[in-house]
Amino acid sequence: MKLSIGSHSFRITPEKAVKFIKVSVYLTCMWPPLEDELKISFRFRKYLSVFLSFGLFFPLLFSIVIYFDDMLIILKSAICMTALANYIAKVIIVTRYHREFEKFRSALNEFILKASNSSKVVFQKYIDKCWKFQFFMVLCYYFGATGIILGPLVLPQKFPTDAIYPFSVNNPVVAGIIYAHQGFAAYLCAAGMVLDGQAALFLWYLNAKFDILVSEINRVAKREDLCWYIRQHQEILAFSDELIPLIRALAFTTVSVTKILIIFSGFFLISNESLLVKLQFVMIAISSTFNTFLYSWAADDLINISGPAMSSEFFNVFCHHSLKMKKMCLFIIYRAQKPIVINIPGLLTTLSSEYYASFLSAVFSCFATIRAVVNS
């Protein structure tokens, strides 16, 4: 983070943005081990985190069985289980696509180190556009996890969750271990949600690559230039073909988890629980929509820059060139008619600003329905 001389305002560079995201998703074991870190220790961290997640998931499930007549405990445990399931699912996705993650990370780092000044300016534009929101999102999740961990200090409960264990927890040492375990699991859940910030960074990088390509259209003056331009376009499309399946998997997991968390949190907001308890889950309900917005924001920009924007620029520039060059560029114009979208037919609607607007509308309708059912 550096202070710009003229504006007296903070400015985040791409290098700082990558470092910040890397630190924020450390617990997800997303970044492959460095040269000075043994792979065995990296895998140990990853499997230990998953094991600890299951170590809380099943006691929470047991609490639902024991307190099946207490709706509030069921809802609290279900929310915690959903957050843990989100973390586990994303670790599985990261493990499944670890080669792709390594490739994307290397491409991003190489771009930051070797890109021209004009290209860096374009990428900086995207960093300036999104870093404040992503920084706020990361703080919300980790502060929210901290609030849940510190809940027993001001609430009449012994542990952060209502998990039930098949052994006595009255021993101070055992109680301390359980408290530490549940606290660490809370931060794992936060890291699972923050992981979407890294996925969004890859999307912003892809958007920047398209934006840079669009800005270089005016450099094309002869056939050799056009051939070079088409090759650059093909390379970006190949990169997107590798990136989008990974983004789809993460986005589908996030949207599904967000819907579940909002429904469960909605019951809490209209319950008779204390204000402090409600505050914890108000933060969950609100912050869980951030991730869907983050994907929709970047995906909507990608739709525009890979489709209409590129097609329009090509048409404006090449209408003045020879017939032979016009025929050569028809491929890119045709490809631009099919912008890159993030969706899963039948499971995930195309992510865009319109999708997020309809998503929020559905959320408010859901809250209204829940309130009407409870009041009746």
Image (tube, rainbow, N blue to C red):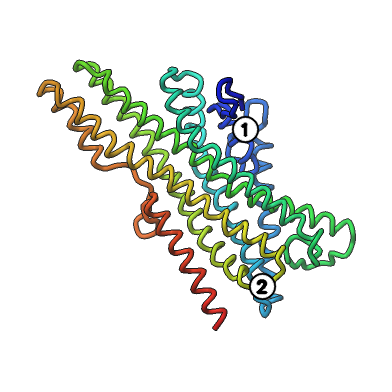
Looking at the image, residue 320 lies above or below residue 279: above
Where residue 226 appears, as percent x and y from the top left, is 23, 21
| Quarter containing the C terminus | bottom right
Where residue 133 appears, as percent x and y from the top left, is 54, 42
Q: Amino acid at mark 2?
A: Leu
Looking at the image, residue 221 lies above or below residue 289: above
Task: Give the number of the mark in front: 1 or 2.
Answer: 2
Q: Amino acid at mark 1?
A: Pro
Which residue was labeled with disc 1?
33
Which residue was labeled with disc 2?
72
The residue sitting at 38% across, 49% down in the picture is 352
Where residue 150 appears, as percent x and y from the top left, is 77, 55
* Disc 1 packing (10 Å; few <14; some 14–19; many ≥20): some
The residue sitting at 65% across, 75% down in the picture is 71
Q: Residue furthest front?
A: 7
The residue sitting at 34% across, 29% down in the picture is 235
The residue sitting at 51% across, 20% down in the picture is 113
